[in-house]
Each structure stands twice: as structure tokens, then as C-alpha cells.
Amino acid sequence: MTGGAPRVDGARLRADLTALARLGADPSGGGITRTGFSAADGQARDWYAARARAAGLDLTRDGLGNTFAFDPGADQRRPGVWSGSHLDTVPRGGAFDGAVGAVAALEALRRVKELGLAPARPLRALVFSDEEGNYGSLLGSTGLARGWSRAELDAMTGRDGDRLADALAAWPHAEGDPAATRLEPGALHAFVELHIEQGPFLEAAGTQAGVVTAIAGIGGGRMRFTGRTDHAGTTPMSERADALAAAGEFIARVPEAARAAGPRAVATCGFVHATPGAANVVAGSAEVSLDFRDLSLARIQVLEREIGALALAVSDSRGVAVTWEPHEVVAPAPMDDGVQAAVAAAAGRAGLSSMAMPSGAGHDSQNMARLAPAGMVFIPSVGGRSHSSAELTAWPDIENGANVLLAAMLALAET
Ligand code: HGY
Ligand code: MN
Ligand code: MN
């Protein structure tokens, strides 16, 4: 870091991320599982709160468990500069997705307090709930950006089929009504998030930091095929209404829909639940998860139409019924020019190479962009891997990213 700018404590950052990575870790090396509102997610929230309080910071939480850390000695009257990310993971995920941004934001506030800095605007560090969508993609930040109705929350179920309402009722890390978490525009001055790239582009370019220009939009939902349960041994192939076979053909053809929508459109079926789920029973129903994305809302709408048309074609040809409840699309989000400039300038002052780039991954920043100017700092992912136990980012890159985040937050606090 050049020019005497405040720096993070790299050793503490590394120690924190190493300690956090133990929470939810599979001892046999199968990655980290801290799914939203799970016991391991709760352990991570306890750990985060203890680290924040140890640094003399206070915390508040909303009804969805979104957590806000701040310095009680700082003047909170002006809208502040906020940063943060998530502590929940995908099942068997990595140690850096979300964690880097959540801990680096905490580190930024710790350093400002330790150095006795007095930025013109207060800083705040956030942990968003269920970013990975155990119950609802970007659940916590969507609650901040547009709120959830009680009916929406009551209808949500998790990957394991359990009700979000039950998980929230048992969740000790929340305060208040989950249906009353919405922030008003103006609640904050700017938002900036540090995150691993989760793709191959920074590493391939040999570049140290990414200045995110836009975040892809995400559509999703569950496609339900309904056929007829039958005996696997006595039912002639010509008389079957096999829901799992229909789901299988649909899943195999979903890439056609992505190709039809555009060169960077993506579509994924991450899991299928078939019932009754016995080897000697023709499946009567099969539910397929859907996740589809693009940087353009128009192309996401093409994706949605193509996927729906494909499902109907398969159901017709296989004599099964099909229903789909598409999730509300989380729109693509352009990042704010001013925040991008602050990130690029901070990287430059730090002597780091940087490049502008879009994000194919979804992030809480795309919801925070609905409330205030928002931007992101990316750091390289080794081999472009993420959402996997192979996820890895080098410690110097994490420290560089955290220094850029700190500098960008301080610069934005003077605007
Ligand atoms: O799925 C995503 O893009 C993010 O990791 N939740
Ligand atoms: Mn993720
Ligand atoms: Mn993430």
C-alpha cells in the first residue's frame, strides 16, 4: 500500500477467516456447509458478534437476522457508507464466498476505530441473511431493498422442504418483524462490497482487482412434473406417465434454452426431488430447481419463456402435467459510476492492477443498489472455482482487496 493510506491488519484478517472456516466445516474435507438459518450459520453469527464487540463495536439486527455493526462513538446522524456480505454458504461450499466481504467490512470498521479516524460519514458493516437462497435467493438484502410480505415469507420453504417461518421463529439472531425489514432510500449514502470473483477472468488476465460494472440478474423457481406412480416391473413402458423421466429430458435440454437467449445466458438445474423415491416405483412427481441468469433483463425474460416452452413440450410428449411458479426475477444491477471510480482510484493508489468487469454471480449489492449508489471490489479466484471445497483465494489478494475496500469506504465517506 503506497502513500501512507490506512491499512487493514492482514494477520488478523487471515486469523478471522481461518477461524470462521472451521464453522460448518466437513472434517472429511467435503467443504463448508453453513446454509441460511442453520445451526452452523448461527455459530457464525455468534462468532461475528463476539469479534465485533471485542473491537468495541455495537450491533443491531432486523427481523430477518440482517446484522449491522457500527461504532457507537461515531456520529450516526448522516447517512453512512455501508459494506458487508454474507456468512451463509452453499452446501459443501468454500471458505471465502461471502466470508471475505463480511470480515473485511468488519476489519474496516475496526481499523477506523483503532486509528482514531473520523470520516465525515459513519461506516457500517453488514451481514445479510440467507444470501445463498436456502429459502430465498438474496433473502436478507431483498428484505432491505423491497421488503417481504408475511404471505411471501410464510410460503417459502428451504432446500430440505422445511418452512422459513419455522426457521425464523427458532432463529435467535433476529429482532423484530421479518415482514418489516425494508429500508427507505436515503438510509445510507453508499454501499461497497468486497467479494471473490468466483470466475476465471482476473486470474487469466493476471489482474489483482476487479471493479464491478454490473451484476447479472437471476430468475429461478421450481418446475413440477406430475405423472402417475406405477409398479416398475409390471407397467409396460408405453403406458407410463413417468415424472422423473420427463424431468430428466427437461434437465438435459435446458442448455438449449440458454443458447437461445444469448452468448452469456446461463441456466442451471441444481437438484431434482422425485417422489415417492423408490427404485421399484415409477416416479409420480418430480420437482426440478431452476436458476437462470443474464446481464440483460430482456434476455432473462427470453430465458424464462424458452424454459417454460421447453417444459410444456416435454410434458406433452411424455403425457405428464407440468406447473411452474417462477420466482420474482432479481433484476440485473448496474454498479454506480461514482462507487466504481472510488474503487478504481483506491486500487490505483494501492499500486494494484485492476480491470472493469461484470459479475455473473449474484450478490447482495444488486439489492443495495436499489437503495443507494453501490459497487463491488473483486479479487481473483484460483482456477475460477467457487461454490466448491476447491474455492481458494490467495491471502495477499484478500489483504489487497480489504485495503481497497477500506480506502474506497473512506473516500466515499467524504463525498
Ligand atoms: O448464486 C450466486 O450467484 C451467489 O453465490 N448467491
Ligand atoms: Mn455464493
Ligand atoms: Mn457470495
Image: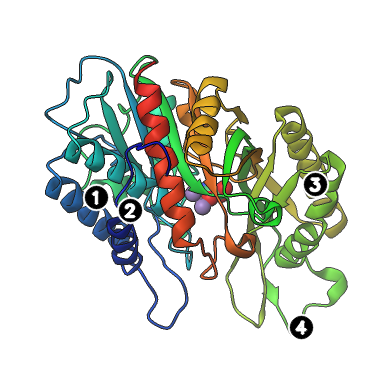
Query: From the viewer's perspective, is the residue at label 4 or at label 2 nearer?
Result: 2
- The numbered mark, 4 or 3, whose residue comes first in the sequence reads 4
How many neighbours does mark 1 have within 10 angstroms: few (below 14), some (14-19), or many (20 or more)?
some
Q: Are marks 1 and 2 in contact (CB under 8 Å)?
A: yes
Q: Hey, what amino acid is under mark 3? A: Ala
Residue 387 place in picture, x, y as percent: 54, 61
Depth check: give the residue in front, 143 or 274: 143
Which residue is denoted by mark 4 in the rendering? Answer: 234
Which residue is at a point 52% across and 64% down the rendered structure image? 392
Give the alpha-carbon distance from disc 4 to disc 3, as whole Å: 38 Å
SS under mark 3: helix
- The numbered mark, 4 or 2, whose residue comes first in the sequence reads 2
Residue 96 place in picture, x, y as percent: 45, 58
Which residue is at a point 58% across and 36% down the rendered structure image? 211
Which residue is denoted by mark 1 in the rendering? Answer: 171
In the image, 198: left or right of 169? right
Which residue is at a point 16% across and 52% down the rendered structure image? 50
Would you identify the image quadrant in which residue 121 lies? top left
Which residue is denoted by mark 3 in the rendering? Answer: 258
Give the alpha-carbon distance from disc 3 to disc 1, as whole Å: 38 Å
Q: Hey, what amino acid is under mark 4? A: Thr
